[in-house]
Amino acid sequence: MPELFTTPLPPTGGGADDPAAAIDAVVAHLAADVRFIHRHRDPARTAGHAEPARPLRPEVAARLPVDRWWSHQVAALDLLRAGESVVISTATSSGKSVCYQVPAVEAALEGGTALMLFPTKALAHDQLSSLAAWAPDGVTVAAYDGDCSPEERSWVRTNANVVLTNPEMLHLGILANHRRWDDFLRRLRLIVVDELHVLRGVFGSHVAHVLRRLRRLVLAVSGREPTFAFTSATIGRPAELAEALCGVPVHSVDADCAARGERTTVLWNPHEALAAGGSGLTASLNVETATVAAELVGAGLRTLVFCRSRRSTELVANEVRARLAATSAAGHAPVGPDTVRSYRAGYLADERRDIELALAHGTLRCVVATNALELGIDIGGLDAVVLSGFPGTTASFRQQAGRAGRGARSSLAVLVAGDDQLDQWMMRHPREAFRRPAEPAVINPSNHHVLLPHLGCAADELPLSRRDEAIWPDDLDDGVRDLVLQDRLTLRDATGGPIACWSGRGAPAPTIGLRSASRGEYAIRRPDGSLLGTVDAARAFDTVHPGAVYLHQGAAWQVTELDRATHTAHVEPSDGAIYTQARSTTEIQLLDVTGTAVVGSMAAHLGRVEVTTRVTGYVAKSTDRHKVIRRVELALPPSTLDTTAVWWVFGPELLERAGVGLDELAGALHAAEHAGIGILPLFAICDRWDVGGVSTPWLAETGAPTVVIHDAHPGGAGVAPMAFHSVRAHLHATLEVLEGCACDSGCPSCVQSPKCGNGNEPLDKAAAARLVAAALSGDPHP
């Protein structure tokens, strides 16, 4: 078992005292290691206080657990009480919840209602407990979600004046049954949308239409607009995203005035030890993460570990327990294995809540979690956070690191780098993690694959008319026309002008999944016929093709049959000894161009494309050594994706100047494509699975070698336009990935991709670097 330090760090204690001494001791030990890359300190900050413009109602002031208001809380509260919509984008533990809780309670006491949306049931129930603990008489707070029985749902509709729910339940349970909710909607004054930064891409685009449909029904029954309160982790341009989601002007409150203790962040790169020829060291991200976490826990720091996958949480938690047990056996202060728990989706709700409470009460010393705990569940005062890999964006990095150090307590965050492009780029540019502006989240409500189904739902709820141009000012006419041509809407004459009524088969709402732009899913069924899960039709051939190993909640299942007629994948348990990677071929057709930019001596374009992909087979590899076990050919029909893309065109003069010959060209383009996709999350809140790519030495529409990076969702999710508008910075960052990696011929830190349908062949990192450098020759670095 590799050790982090030759001399174990003595426990210094945590508890109620400030852990500054323990943190200093830990950082001093870390700094002596070659893997220590960078230390950043944010000094402690005193609070800025203010008082609301008008006093709170006496019954609210008497019960509210707030002694003094921070200035940003007052700014948000005053705007909301004046009927102005607000987005509060401040750090973790900055008191965002109370900013909307008070107006919600006041609305209920004055005969109104409030609706609060949370991305997860756990977060909704956490807020339910928080609000119910102080809400005065006359305020009835209730959760309305998929766990409610029919009797409970009826009780909530009849009695609650503050309802907590999630976007799916709003879509299916409230809007689709809005007549049962007419009294609640007639009195609705405040709509809360928590964790705004989660609402990106296709999911955010769907939620934008759900919120517009909600506004529309409130206007229809009450004649007035509700007020919106958004909360968010720190992201770029939060007011723009909030306005795109709800369709009304939104004020931004982002000057954090909360008190804060000193925060220390350490960047830790295992690859530095490997590059230095260290013996007994490991490149395993899980083991490195567990090693660091165990040292922090052993030093008395209450620690939260963020992992990238459910499987990783279990592996890291087990490794932390083993290391703490070994330390105890060596005669150091024991830390019991029962004080280390994992936390992820797939656990029962009661089990997750038990872990949250144990962490909040201080009985747990370490929790290893997926990003489920990145959201604002109140988990009390933590001393340290360990991030197993860069979480993809600086916004998520700051959100996760900020989970430690509540109030004026000092805190420590350690980022343990993985081997992909973003992680290693951050290790080469350590100050960028702290000075780089947070990326914006992007949505695309005009995507017809998302827009049309929701217009159908709106027409089913209430016939569409010219009045609805206020809700969909840019898309209503085209959307109604398309739905009429599809025989899903019927135009009728009415007193105020023509109306469009739903005429499709059955109710439209149940056919829409808010997490996907594709119309349809494949069911994944166990041998007994029970439902294991679902997968979007657009990804089914990649994910659940015959022979595929499918992971669900950490368990492996092998696909025995893919029934395309019934959209069903049949699976049986697998021992997890192998994993599979689909092999595919991709063709692309450029349909139109909506933007062109010249960067250096290269042209970049934005537009609509059609991507045709055929899964041709798969490779099975051993889980432990990644050795190829077998290659299997498949005969599956092609799938077609109509989406948006950005593409780079490399002319013949550029190729000559770069010295890239025909024998190197395919590998150079392919490597540049992978590097560009891997680094793209620096410029928009997305991950590599939100985009795809195609590179070809000759594309008919451009007449030249071309690299295409496209949104991986039908109609586009807004990532490609962001890549186009950031094209200069994106290309410079891509070049830094290619030139900055120390490997000889390409690795996961620069040009290899885990989702490549061609098995990462061919790749020519050196030629790609020359190609992109020649394209940017003379172009100033942004």
Image (spheres, helix red, strand yellow):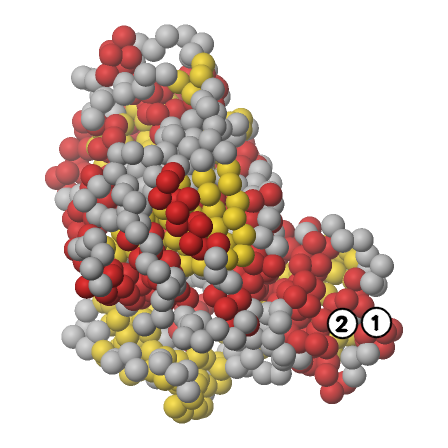
Residue carrying label 1: 654
Q: Amino acid at mark 1?
A: Leu
Query: Do tag 1 and tag 2 residues touch (Cβ < 8 Å)?
Result: yes
Residue 82 circle label: none
Give whichever of 480, 745 is nearer the camera: 745
Res 440 visible: no
Q: Which percent across, then down, holds residue 733?
A: 67, 59
Viewport quadrant of the N terminus: bottom left
- Nearest the camera: 56 or 523? 56
Tell me which residue sits at (20%, 59%) in the image. Answer: 331
Disc 1 or 2, which lies upstream in sequence?
1
Residue 491 versus residue 758 in the image, above or below: above
Q: Position of residue 666 (x, y in %)?
A: 69, 81
Compared across the picture, whether 16 is left or right of 600 comes to left
- The residue at 66%/69% (across/down) is 738
Amino acid marked by disc 2: Leu
Q: Would you identify the image quadrant in which residue 710 lies?
A: bottom right
